[in-house]
Structure formats: C-alpha cells, structure tokens
Amino acid sequence: MMLLTGILLILLVLVCGWQGLTIFFSLSLNFVVIILALVLVAGGFEPLIVSGILSLILLATSIFMNTKQPLTAKTAFVTSLIVVLGLLIIIVPLSQLAATYGFGAEDAEEIEGFGLAIGLSFQKISIMMIILGSLGAIAETSIAVASGLVEILEYDAQMGPKQLFKAGIAIGEKIIATAFNTLFFSFFGSFLSLTMWFIQLGYPISKIVNHKILIGEGLALLIGVIGVIATVPLTSWLLNYFRKPKDE
C-alpha cells in the first residue's frame, strides 16, 4: 500500500509538476475526511447531515484545490451541489420503494452471531453511499464542461449565451458516454466475483437480476448517470450566468 502510494505521488509530480503535490494533498485530505465521517456515523450522528457536510468538503477540496481558473471552479462547485440536491428528490423515495438497504440473505450466516440493533438507519446509510458514489462523476463532468467553455471564451469572449450553451451541450455529449462507461465498469467489476458465484451455484437469471445487492448497485449506477446528464446543461447555463457581470 505504501509502495503504491509512493508511486502515485511520483507519477503525479512527473506529470503535473508541483501541482501534483496539491492533487496528492487533496486526495489525502479527502481520505481523512471520509474516515472521519464514517466514525461520526458509527458514533450515532445523523448520516444525512454528515453526508451533506462531507459532500461540501469533498467538493471544495477536489474542485478549488485542483482548478486554477476561478470561473471554472465556481461553476463546477455550484453545479455539483445543485445536482446532488436534485438527486436527493429521486434517491429518497427510490430507496424506500426498492428496500435494497441492509444485508442480503447470503450474509445471514456471517452475521448470525451479531446483533443488528446498532441504532443506525440502513436506509440513510444507503442514501449516503449513493450520494458519495455519484459525487465524483458529477464534479468531474462539470469541471470538464466548464473548462471547455472557458477555453472557448478565451478565443471568443463575445460569444453569445445561446452559442455558448450549445457548445457546452456539444462538449457534454462527448463526456456523458465516457462517464457512463466509467460508472458501469466500476459497477460490473465490483460485482464480477459475486455474479460468478451465483452462476456457479446455479442461480436462475431472474433471481440474479432481481437480487437485492445487484438491484441496489444498479439503482446507484442509474442515479449517477442521471446526475451526469443533468450536470451538462446546468453547467452550461450557470457558466453563462456567472460570466454576465464581467461582460456587462
């Protein structure tokens, strides 16, 4: 682990120069913040409040520490917050209806000797996991679109709002497919061994597709993709909005 961390640091410095140290520091800070959040939730703090504060800190460190252009950073930060808040409207009722939180039947043997009355809401923890899982893809998409639009403005500062918005959508079209593949491969890779286990045990396809764990992760994947798609037009619109005072 230490060896891989050292290789990561060296590669960041070689590729990004001294900015690589800032990136490494922000990654380390985010890791510490996530561990602290887990300790707070395990200690009885409200998971949704902790996830809200955690989202603010993660976005601030990831965007403002690693993005030099103020307009890009401001647009990406506000966009990510709005999209995450909007996703909560979808996540909360879906989590209640799907009831995919908690443990699956396959966990029964492992947790048989443990008590489940630990004072935590598994539904809220599930919501927290979905939010954090979507946050990175949303912020990455917003930064990519905003950065592209800022570069366009450097060459044509007089471009109108409609043309700039269309340019943002055009940039987003190229990013959405990549972001979707990233989320999908992460989902598929994390459950490859479990799926193979189901197949070896002779589970029918209908039972695999409707499995509690698989459905929960599938919902998280779809919510993340919806967030990425919503990020593209919102980033384009907000960048137009934030640049108005300078133009006027």
Image: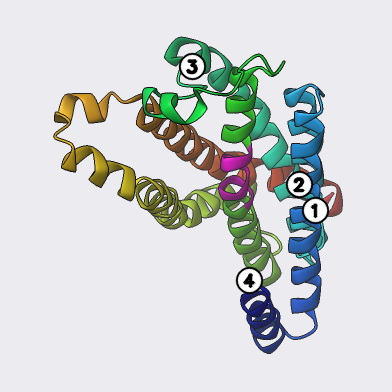
Image: 156 above or below 114: below
The quadrant in which residue 104 appears is top left
Res 94 label = 3
**Amino acid type of the residue that numbered disc 1 sits on in the rendered structure:** Val
**Which quarter of the picture shows residue 64?**
bottom right
**Three-letter residue code for mark 3:** Leu
Please tell me how crowded label 1 is: few (under 14), some (14-19), or many (20+) other residues with Cα within 10 Å.
few
Of circles 2 and 3, which is in front? 2
Disc 1 from disc 2: Cα separation: 5 Å
Q: Which residues are magenta?
A: 132-139
- Mark 4 to mark 1 CA distance (whole Å): 16 Å
- How crowded pointer 3 is (Cα within 10 Å; few <14, some 14-19, many 20+) is rated as some
Up the image or down, 36 lies above or below 212; here it is below
Q: Are marks 1 and 2 in contact (CB under 8 Å)?
A: yes
Residue drawn at x 81%, y 43% as measured from the top left: 36
Color scheme of the displayed model: rainbow
* Depth order, front residue of 246/235: 235
Write down the residue under mark 1.
32
The reply to whether the C-beta atoms of the residues labelled 3 and 1 are less than 8 Å apart is no
**In terms of secondary structure, where does tag 4 sit?**
loop
Q: Secondary structure at mark 2?
A: helix
Disc number for residue 35: 2
Label located before the other in sequence (3 or 4): 4
